[in-house]
Image (cartoon, rainbow, N blue to C red):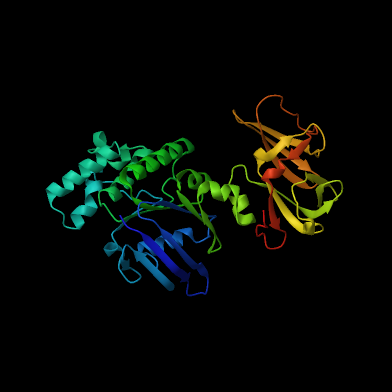
Amino acid sequence: MARVELDGVRKVYPNGHVGVAGASFSIADGELLVLVGPSGCGKSTLLRMIAGLESISAGTLRIGERVVNDIAPRDRDIAMVFQSYALYPHMSVADNLAFGLKLRGHDRASVDARVREAAKTLELDALLDRKPGQLSGGQRQRVALGRALVRNPQVFLLDEPLSNLDAKLRMSMRVEIARLHRQLGATMVYVTHDQIEAMTLGQRIVVLDRGEIQQIDTPMALYERPANLFVATFLGSPAMNVLRGRLVRAGGWALALEDGNRVPLGDALPDAAMEGRDVAIGIRPEHLQRADGGGFAPVVEVVEPVGSDVFVNLRHGAVPLIARLPPGDLPEPGSVLPLRLATRHLHLFDAQSGTRLAG
């Protein structure tokens, strides 16, 4: 396996559109790194540049000790798994697994040994004689993974490999990929738009938006200390609540909302210089808590019991909110639900730039 290094890697298309605006980071040998962001953010473009399927407009890309900017994809010693399985329908599972090795001139004994090893690792032993049309979606995805696995490449590149699967299969395949990564100790770069996949799979996550890297960190560091409003609201399900207004002091701190309502903040802000500043305050749904007094009283709109949690959709004036509460005595739609913010868990952002403020 190998380390991957990107130094100012940039992609500009002939029409002037900037696909990736200067990516600089390293992927450690054996690390599973996830590129995540909404459609059009540049994550697949970045992966395709690592693969050699997109040219690099500027910057340097290294795989191992080699600069690979001008090296053909087949000579980069990488293997890619695509969103579409791209299996040959007329070939058996064994032949699909072996095809790339045969093209590269490996002898039959070596090919057979690698195919058997990959099939065992992915529990495909009993399916080697079947055609892709006789397999389930999850089995076809495992064959696509196996075709990359037999290559024993320096780097695995996975481009939204689970997006064609249903929710239950996606969950089981996430576990499969995580298990495979631990077993192989492989360097993997994984692209997804699904923040749950990113949080559960990535050892580190690169969050992108409009071609720009927003933040790189471990999943929980991103969740607990997002660098800006985009990261704060993109990661987390349900998404972080955001309240916009001006900080005021009246028997403790409060946020004066744009519609005239106020939300008490207690003593969460020790810096008196913050008074009068326009801010955006983020609070995760689990940190909106029932209040006996001293909080604020939004109106319940929709109650969503999901088993171990209840998601309560509310509105405070013009501001929509969602609270994650334990199951039990559920509020009724149309009722008022007194809440308070868990002030130790407030996230403070600049109202204009969205950048995280100190604290």
Q: In which quarter of the image is residue 58?
A: bottom left
Residue at position x 53%, y 71% in the image: 17
Q: Position of residue 129 (x, y in %)?
A: 22, 38
Q: Where is residue 115 in the image (x, y as percent from the top left)?
A: 21, 44
Residue 154 as seen in the image, left or right of residue 285: left
Query: Vertically, is 301 above or below 41?
Result: above
Q: Is residue 278 visible?
A: yes
Residue 3 as seen in the image, left or right of residue 332: left
Residue at position x 33%, y 50% in the image: 186
The quarter in which the N terminus is drawn is bottom left
Residue at position x 76%, y 55% in the image: 271
Residue 287 as seen in the image, left or right of residue 143: right
Q: Where is residue 172 in the image (x, y as percent from the top left)?
A: 42, 36
For the image, the number of numbered tags is 0
Q: Which of 183 and 177 is in front in this view?
A: 183
Q: Is residue 258 visible?
A: no
Q: Nearer the viewer, residue 346 or 232?
A: 346
Query: Vertically, is 20 above or below 243?
Result: below
Residue farthest toward the top in the current orientation of the protein: 328
Q: Which of 274 and 175 is in front in this view?
A: 274
Q: Where is residue 70 in the image (x, y as percent from the top left)?
A: 33, 72
